[in-house]
Image (cartoon, coloured by chain):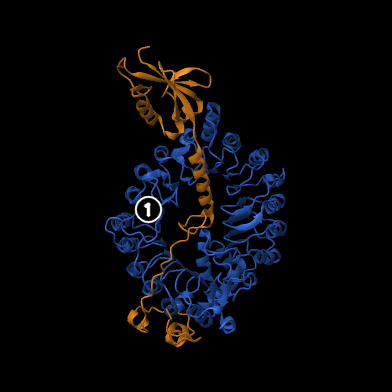
Amino acid sequence: MLRMASSFPEEVLEHVFSFIYDDKDRNAISMVCKSWYEIERWCRRRIFVGNCYAVSPPMVIRRFPEVRSVELKGKPHFADFNLVPEGWGGYVYPWIAAMATAYPWLEEIRLKRMVVTDEALELIAKSFKNFKVLVLSSCEGFSTDGLAAIAANCRNLKELDLRESEVDDLSGHWLSHFPDSYTSLVSLNISCLGSEVSFSALERLVGRCPNLRTLRLNRAVPLDRLANILCRAPQLVELGTGTYSAELQPDVFSSLAGAFSGCKELRSLSGFWDAVPGYLPAIYPICPSLTSLNLSYATIQSTDLTKLVSQCQSLQRLWVLDYIEDIGLEALAAFCKDLRELRVFPSEPFAQEPNVSLTEQGLVSVSEGCPKLHSVLYFCRQMTNDALATIARNRPNMTRFRLCIIEPRAPDYITLQPLDDGFGAIVEHCKDLQRLSMAGLLTDRVFEHIGNHAKKLEMLSVAFAGDSDLGLHHVLSGCENLRKLEIRDCPFGDKALLVNAAKLETMRSLWMSSCSVSFGACKLLGQKIPRLNVEVMDERGPPGSRPESCPVEKLYIYRTVAGPRFDMPGFVWTMDEDSALRLS
Amino acid sequence: MGRRGSASSSSSLESSNYPALSSRSSLYQHNRDLSTDLRLGLSIATSSQGNPSTPSVSESDWPPIKPFLKETLAAEENECNSATFFVKVYMEGIPIGRKLDLLAHDGYHNLIRTLDHMFNTTIIWAEMDGEHSEQYHVLTYEDKEGDWLMVGDVPWEMFLSSVRRLKITRADI
């Protein structure tokens, strides 16, 4: 057998491997034998690094010399909710600098929760001659000057997507840096930018790029300019409007409606800031073919929302504010039989009392009416075990279930019991559940259910739950496929972590904040498990200045082959052999 | 949690007490025997009574919504609360008129109900048909071009953008 493998020409193997894209498959191929490892590493074109500190740029470059596409993720997920202080890390510059020399033919860079600077963007713009795709998701640290460099220099750019990034918006002038000869734009997402871009520059750009299929505008683009833009890009598949509000004028309305009708390929809509119900009928003609609708910024009420979704029979994804209410969700359940993903956000997240009639019933209706529903994010103010159990029985195909009850530790509002059994039903029935985020009053029992049943679970988010270390122990010892665990404000301490320390090397990362893990335990973990970085975050000052038994503020543990990092701010300490000696 | 030892090497945290730490193996242990694991006297930890802090909206960390959405909602709320649109309302035969905030109503039905109450009568508008008693009143409005029209023929939002003032006239004209 071995002889046969070695007599097979490399070129043939390489050709075969070129049809394999999935990382897991590629990793499997590379472990067959040394020669396959060698052949595979020279032809791997795409790299995904889920934690930028798990490996170093030189290590990646050494192993994979011919990469064309890189995806990196930086800060922990809880950074989205202000739990990671400013300056924590996630700097992309070292990666760009290393790749600038190693990968001159790099085409794609996708970053999530990383700190990107104008210097990094300028370096990208001048280092990669065939650069095509830049996606900056929830990134920060750069300004529109950096964007101008990209626009001016990347002749072959196809995709520029700034989704939800925090950009230092100096002016809208950067867009005019795309030269007149530039026509290759396929996807542009500037929805996060505040300032106005030149509308004529935008219209000309749109008009000269025949392959443009995705255009997500920012709020500053007024509604009366939208028709002109749409008329220049009738081939658009995905559109994000600017502000969707204007004085009702019949001529503006009819040009808008006409422009929408002309976009026969339009399948996804977003934007809708300040949406005014009077202009909604302009999109009615294309509603039946819409597959994705993001109304997260549209403060329109239930009646109009209901009328809208009732016409979207092909809808697969809906993101909407809780203005839709139970009644709108019932209509969704009745008319949108192809629905796969639903996200309902709170319109008044900081109000104590409900401002709309959105309850657990809305979610139950959708779970009953939409057989393909498998991904849910739902913010509400009340829940019952019965409702959760019904949802679980209705939708055993659920893969992502995230519930947030506005009030922490809220019990089943009818029985006043914890919601343990409800979530227990979810993990029991939904055997393919990959992601779970829990809410309400929860005891250690819910973690027992999770440990027993959630065998495919990869990511778990926990807040204000549990009674003791037993809870954490159930999860760490039972969830075989767990990769990411994030915990806040739970009474979990040292024991469960220390007993399950080996488990941590099989996961991407663990976040714990406002829990009861002591500094001593952190030191021990850091000392004993070399391939883990145990990072303690404490804005009160060095943890060594307090007793060892004192709990740390925040703890972030991740596996790595790159050793401790050296770009940490003053409030982050890595627990390793050396630091343990230094700090004790 | 670790209240026993205060010395730098508290006995409860010796790595030898935790098999997972003393071995160099990185193999995941399927150790589900809780009594063995936790025989070192795990005491029920006191639950963290922390509640989410509620500083300013932009700094808050609960509920878990992204900054972009948080900011958009905060801005919307400020706008909604301050928007008003008062118009004059006259009833035929009564020289002193009233003023009414149209934006405090979400549609025609709501508006008619308020006017019925304000003027103590039954108001006729475009959606009502059938025999009308002479004791009823008709609701009309003056639009931007100065014409008087019956209320209710156009969508509510379109009405809001063209109405100047309201007049309630007798039904027998």
Classify B159 as above or below A319. above
Q: Residue A464: image x %, image y %? A: 40, 64
Task: Give the quarter of the figure containing the C terminus of chain B.
Answer: top left
Compared with residue B97, is residue A529 higher up or lower down, i.e. above or below? below
Horizontal and vertical percent for residue A268? 50, 44
Task: State whether residue B23 is above or below residue B96.
Answer: below
Can residue A268 be seen here? The reply is: no
Query: Please, what secondary structure does the residue beneath circle 1 have?
Result: loop
Chain assignment, label 1: A
Residue of label 1: A381
Q: In the figure, the blue chain has which letter?
A: A
Q: Along the line of sight, which residue is nearer the eye, A315 or A64? A: A315
Chain rendered orange: B
Residue depicted at x 55% and y 67%: A51
- Where does the image place residue B96, in percent across and percent down from the top left? 44, 21
User: What amino acid type should be assigned to the residue bearing mark 1?
Assistant: Arg
Looking at the image, residue B10 lies above or below residue B50: below
Q: Position of residue B73 (x, y in %)?
A: 50, 47
Q: Residue furthest left?
A: A415
**In the foreground, A346 or B53:** B53
Would you identify the image quadrant in which residue A307 lies?
top left
In this view of the protein, can residue B58 be seen by the observer? Answer: yes
- Front-most of residues A78 and A520: A520
- How busy is the neighbourhood of tag 1: few (under 14 within 10 Å), some, or many (20 plus)? many
Give the camera-side residue of A261 and A304. A304
Along the horizontal axis of the image, is A152 left or right of B79? right
Q: Residue at x 32, y 64 (%)?
A: A420
